[in-house]
Each structure stands twice: as C-alpha cells, then as structure tokens.
Amino acid sequence: MPIKFEILAEDKATRARAGLLHTAHGVVETPAFMPVGTGGTVKGMTQDELETLGVQILLGNTYHLYLRPGHEMIREAGGLHRFMSWPHPILTDSGGFQVMSLKTLGRVTEDGVWFRSHVDGSSHFLSPERAVEIQLALGADIIMCLDECVEYPATPETLQRAVSLTTRWAKRAKEALARETGNGIRDTGPSIGGSFLGPNEERAGMEKSRANAPTPDSEPPIPIRLAGDAYPVSRLPYPTLFGIVQGGTDKALRRQSAEALLDLDFEGYALGGLAVGEPKAEMLDTAEFTAELLPRDRPRYLMGVGTPEDLLEGVARGIDMFDCVLPTRNARNACAFTSEGKVTLKNARYARDDGPLDPSCPCMVCRRYSRAYLRHLFVSGEMLGANLATHHNLHFYLDTMRRIRQSLLFGEFAEFHGRVRSHL
Amino acid sequence: MPIKFEILAEDKATRARAGLLHTAHGVVETPAFMPVGTGGTVKGMTQDELETLGVQILLGNTYHLYLRPGHEMIREAGGLHRFMSWPHPILTDSGGFQVMSLKTLGRVTEDGVWFRSHVDGSSHFLSPERAVEIQLALGADIIMCLDECVEYPATPETLQRAVSLTTRWAKRAKEALARETGNGIRDTGPSIGGSFLGPNEERAGMEKSRANAPTPDSEPPIPIRLAGDAYPVSRLPYPTLFGIVQGGTDKALRRQSAEALLDLDFEGYALGGLAVGEPKAEMLDTAEFTAELLPRDRPRYLMGVGTPEDLLEGVARGIDMFDCVLPTRNARNACAFTSEGKVTLKNARYARDDGPLDPSCPCMVCRRYSRAYLRHLFVSGEMLGANLATHHNLHFYLDTMRRIRQSLLFGEFAEFHGRVRSHL
C-alpha cells in the first residue's frame, strides 16, 4: 500500500487525533500543515530552510507546474521530488481549484474543463484522467481527484450538480489510476503521453500511455545522484489517490458526496469547497459534520484552510491535514502571525521597535532581527523582508501544529484547546 | 588604534600580499571581498547565510541608509551592526558615489554637494563633515572620506579639479572626525545632531555634536542583548577613516592625489574613480601604479571592483580589499559566475540540464539544485531564483578570494595566478 495511516492518540472530548502517515518519501506526523509550494518552490524559502523549519510534507500545485515548466519536463527530470530537490513527501492538487479560482475558466462539461493559461492565454483541457496523468508525471506521494469546487454562495442546484459531477469524476480518476498502476511500480523514465490534448486527443494519449506502461518489476528503488548527493528514486510506488467531498454547507449534499466516495473506497478523503467565503462557524460546522461521515482509519484533509485558529479548530473536528497560502502570502504582504496576534510590519509604530517580531518565538527571525529592521526591509522593498516574514510565519504554523500534536500525545488536548484558542 | 593591519605573506614576483585586518568587530582576512549590503541587507541573503558563506566584512551604503531608514534612526537602534544584526566588521562608503552615479546630483560646490533623493525627490546636502557625521551615526568600523568621483572619460581639467577638491575634502573629513573622537570612545546613545541640514545649519549641528560629545571613558564595551542573543556594544572605538585617491587614469594626477593624502596620514587608502568605464588594462595599470605609491603597512581598497578576474589581478597589483555589486546584482538578473565562465540561467539550453550550476562548486546551491530547476525559477519569476543565484555567486567570489589568499600563504601565488587567470 502506497501510504499507511497510523493513529497514535485520540482525544476523548473531541474528534481530534494524532497519527503517522507513512509514505514512500518518509513519515508525516499528523495533524500536519502543508506549506504551499506553488510552482515547485515555497516562495522565498530554500529547501534547506524548509527542512530546518521541520516541514514534513509540501503541497505542489498541478495547475502551475503543468503550465511551467510542464509536467513532461518534470517527469523527464525524475519527478517533482528530484526536480525541486525535495526528497520528502509531496501532495499535489488536481489543478481544478486554480482553474476555477484564477478566473481562467472556460466551459465545464461532463468530460472536463477548458481553461486558459494565466501565463500566455493558451487554451487547455483538464479531465479527471488528464489530472491523474499530469500528477503521475509530477510523481507526488498523494494526488487528488479532479473535483468541481463552487463558489459561496451557490444555489442548491449548482451544489447538487457539483456533487454529482465530482462523484462521476472521482470514479473516472480512480479508474485512470488503476489503468496506470499495474503492479504498483511506475516508471518515471521516458514520456508516456502527449501534452496539451483535448478530450479526443487525450483518449489517444491515454492509449499511448498504456502502450508504454511499465513492465512488471519489483526491484528496489534505484537511487539517483545529483551533484554528489543521493536523491529520490526513479522507480517508486504509484501515488495514493484522495477523493474530495463537495456539497458546500449543505449537510444532505455533504452526506451524499461522502457516501458516494466511500463506495469508491479511497485511501484518504479531502474536504473541498470550504473556506470559499462562507462564515467561519459554518465552515467548521460543515467540516465536523463531514469528518464524522468518513472512516476513522483514513486521513482527512481540509483543503485551503486556514488561520492558526482554524488549524486548532479543524483538528478538534477530526481533521488530519491542512494546506493554506496564508502564512506565505501574508508574509510577502508584511503581515506576520504571532503569539500576540497579527503584526502588520509596515506599520509606523514599529519604526523604532527593537524588540523581536514575536517575543515568544524561538525561530531564527525572532532570535536575530528586530521589528524595526523588518519594517525597514518592507518599507524599502527589500526582498529579505519577504524571506524573513515567510520563515517566521511558517515556523508559527508548524509550531502551532507541533504543540497541538504534542498535547494530543500527552492526552492534554482539551486543556490546550481551551488555553490557546483565545491567543491564536 | 581602531584598526590594525598585519601582513602575513607577500608574493615575491608580484605586489600581492595576505594579511589580517583587526577591527573592533573582529578580524578580516585579506585580501577580502566585501559584499554590498546597500540598504542594511545584502539583497536576498539572510545574515545567517552570509555567515555560513564566510563573509567577514560587509559594505553599507551611506546614501541609501541616510535616506531610509535614516542615520538617526540607525543610531538610536544602536548602530548599523545592531540594527541589521551583523556583529561583524562593516565598512560604509561616504555616499558620494551614489549621489553622483544615481544621477541625482545637483550642484557640487566647495562646501559639498546638493542632491535629490531617488526615493521622494527631496533635496539634501552632503559635505565632508556631514558624511563623517552620518557614518558615525551608522557606526561602521571603517568609514570613507567624501570624494569627487568623475566619469570616464573626463578632461584633464575636470580630473585635476576633482583631485584638488577630494584632497581638501579629505582634510576636512579628517578634522571632522578628530573633533568627534576625544579619547577614541564614542557614545552611540542619544542623538548628537540634526538631520537634513544645509552648510550653515550643519555647522550649527556640528557645534551641537561637540556639546554632546562623550565624556572620557575607558570602560570595556557593554554587551547589549536582543531577543536573547548577545549583540554588538553601544560604546565602541571610533571608526577608522580611509582617504580616497582620485585622478582617473592620469598617473601624474594619481601621484599628486596620493601624496596629498599621505601628508594627511590615513590608516587606510582607497583607490576611487576606477571601474567607471575605462578599458580594463588601464584600470589595472592605474591600480598598480597607485598601489605602489601607498605605504606598505596600510590596507589598500579598490572601490567598486569587479569581476572574479579583476580580484585576482587586483591582488597581484597590491590590493587588499574589494567591493562590487556584480555577484549580487548579476545573480538577480539570472547571471551566475562559475568555474566554467558565466552562465545565463534563463537560457533555453538549460531547460533539461539536470547538472549542477557549477560542477566544481561545493556551495549549497550546487550541491542541491539543478540548472533546469534554477532556470525554471527565473523563467517563472520565483524569488527563490535570485536567492539561490546570489548565494552561489557570493560563494564563488569568496571562495576565489580564499583560494588566492591560501596560495599567498603557501607561497604559491605566481603559480595560482598563472593557472587560474584563464579560467575566471
């Protein structure tokens, strides 16, 4: 089995749990926060720095990587792990959310979705099969089904249509992956398909993929060396596919979506279509309701969430994995998360503040630099400002998650929850 | 004496030498390359990273720091070392070169130079005394006299005028520093002068400075703590002032300028007005001629130079210190210095090149990332591209200098010079 999810502790009062997610590229301690490495980089962070921060799993954006440098180029480079020199776990999304949220959307059909590139305006087609094919080329440990994520608010009809379509697409994604898997070992060597194909050409491409499918092989992974260091292998287990529950804040639809996906039996389940504009209480309520519908022994991933408080509240509702651009995007906009709340670093009040960004934080930035210096960097447009604020914000997120996890392992989550929720 | 220069080895065939420059913030191995930390940051590098790279001394730009955040604010923060958390040696320039090269120049008078801020267009005045006052507020270990740096080519009359003015300004700078020094201990506490003053107001400001001059005191430095770590002291020896030899490529004028400065007896001498457009051979020839005019026991600093080859050739001509924006600015423009020559990282030929940027380089970037990945970062406009290329280029410069120095200490400079010059 490509991943193995192990539960180590469960809170008695809430649905919170701590566990281990075993993948081909290492073990992820859950609950886990996944920094967003959009185009093969967490903006402004070196991979050394991410390791120092204790990042255990990254999220890669299929949409961005498909457009630049292109999934075929990444496959030829040995997959995303090797291309970006990140020998640890990676999860990729399906690309669907970006297609829809970047307003590059064309038609959504039963087959899939047409969209325009935000880079050069060129026209592209994404289907459930194509999303699997691209993610296989990227070589992530966990990949996502293409889903239809609708905006908030949406009519019941729109939500129902999205749930039904997401279900049918999930089935097609699972079948597409099964066609590729064979004995569970994939060959990341030669190209297996064309690029930029429409629905008809795509089917031809998929035929071609099957024709070039790897021969049965159970040899151990072959290490590849890059510049003197050992790097990830060219032959790895196929990724694990997660299904995505949709349905907005409509509980009947969430149940319908979850049950349909459970029939398809995924190894992990994501909660999509949340944090898209609905009130916070509804988001958390829906997350809790949905998490309860999902099997205990499978990881649950709340997509695109959220603030530090959301992480705590999400864990309390049974969520194991999160991703969000907030810590990194806010950092570039001079907004820091601290134990004392948000700090807007361009604020004139910090011009002469020689204290650390967060007095309670042991990160490299808070140990070394003053608020006055950070403010100066942002006011002067120096890129180091974004680098340092990103470092701190990721540390804050990861540290929050570590403390949550620790409290679960020590059976003190309820106490921690009550004590910390007001400070995040 | 605020600095002490110690010569450890001298080449027999050339004028090259290796030494140690002792400062209040530590020892600098010479020959030394000083990365340019324009606005209190080497663009895209954390101070931790600079330390890892082995940077021993930084250059700060007085012009930029005077405008943002302002030298008074930096003084109040405890000086530039503490403000930017760089507890190692710093040299600041006088601001004159930026005023002239950024085309913000107004009138040059006997008193000083009027200029406009490139930030907000406001009008400012810089005199020899003002340049000293600002640099004292910044608190560098080595400061520079205000000089007049003329463009290439220039008429003999222009060059002669610049040499004479630079000499008179050097005398005034030395006198201004002497007025401040007292027993050689400065107080970086309360403000000692106004800001944005013209020539008349400035004299008043200088009076005020003297009125607030520190009382005699020979206590040891008092460590200050910032966010839990020990940081530079608030009471330090006054900086060392370097004179700057001008005269373009005219040897008679270079001699006139050097002799006049020698009469003033500076603790170090810089070669200014070079690398401003003259042919490379003339630059090196002038540097050699000028270096020979300077006392053996004082450090020699070739300002604004240059390429890796220039460093090697400059050392061979008796230069001890260099600064240049090339490694950092070129890096941000996707241009890397390697043992195989310059690499333009956006070039399409690197799209599938999974080799390291420089196969001979042991830096973090070359150990971890491929040319294809670096190209992807630049093509996609990801800031990590600039971060990584800057890291590599600085490593290349510092490593070149370390190898030069090592060859001098082992008495093998001539051989190294012959072997390496063709590869840089």
Image (cartoon, coloured by chain):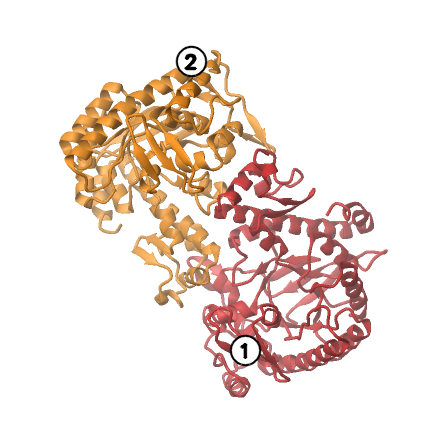
Chain colours: A red, B orange
Chain letter for mark 1, please: A
Nearer-the-camera pick, A331 or B5 = A331
Task: Name the element at disc 1.
Answer: loop
- Residue B226: give its label: none
Looking at the picture, how far across and down is residue A249, in whole percent?
A: 77, 68
Tag 2 residue: B183
A409 sits to left or right of B413 = right
Nearer-the-camera pick, B297 or B132 = B132
Residue at image position (24%, 40%) is B151
Whether residue A400 is visible, yes or no, is yes
Crowd rating for badge 1 (residues with CA inside 10 Å; few <14, some 14–19, many 20+): few
Tag 1 residue: A217
Q: Please check whether the numbered discs 1 and 2 fall on a single chain.
A: no
Crowd rating for badge 2 (residues with CA inside 10 Å; few <14, some 14–19, many 20+): some
Looking at the picture, how far across and down is residue A147, in whole percent?
A: 66, 75
Is B422 rendered above or below residue B206? Answer: below
Q: Amino acid at mark 2?
A: Asn
